[in-house]
Image (cartoon, rainbow, N blue to C red):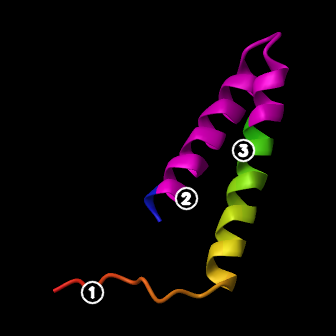
Amino acid sequence: MTLFLFLILVALVLGIIGFAVHGLFYLLIIGALVLLADLFYVAIRFRRGGGKHRVTR
């Protein structure tokens, strides 16, 4: 789950920089691709279910 949140944060930062800075539009595109890849990763992970859940006590 931390990887998911980290990649969301990276995509958000790249998107903001790409939108705000003139000439760095490619960062916005990279941020969008990272976001899509992250959502795909989470969809695959949740679809498989999981038997490796850690129990917190």
Q: Mark on residue 5? A: none
Mark in the foreground, 2 or 1: 1
Residue in the image at 75% along x and 63% along y: 40
The residue wearing badge 3 is: 34
52, above or below 32, in the image: below
Label 3 SS: helix
Identify the amino acid type marked 1.
Val
SS at badge 2: helix
Gap between marks 2 and 1, in whole Å?
20 Å
At a point 23% along the width and 83% down the height, the residue shown is: 56
Closer to the N terminus: mark 2 or mark 3?
2
Tag on residue 4? 2
Does residue 52 show up magenta in the picture? no
Residue 20: where, in percent of width, then height?
72, 21
Q: Is residue 6 left or right of residue 29?
A: left
Report the amino acid beneath label 3. Answer: Val
In the picture, measured across the screen, residue 52 lies left or right of residue 50, that is left
What's the CA distance linking mark 3 and mark 1? 30 Å
Sequence-wise first label, 3 or 1: 3
Residue at image mark 1: 55
Instruction: Calculate the distance from the C-alpha at mark 2 to the C-alpha at mark 3.
Output: 11 Å
Residue at 83% over, 23% down: 26
Q: What percent of the width, then of the height, locates residue 13?
A: 60, 34
Query: Chief secondary structure of the magenta span?
Result: helix
Q: Amino acid at mark 2?
A: Phe
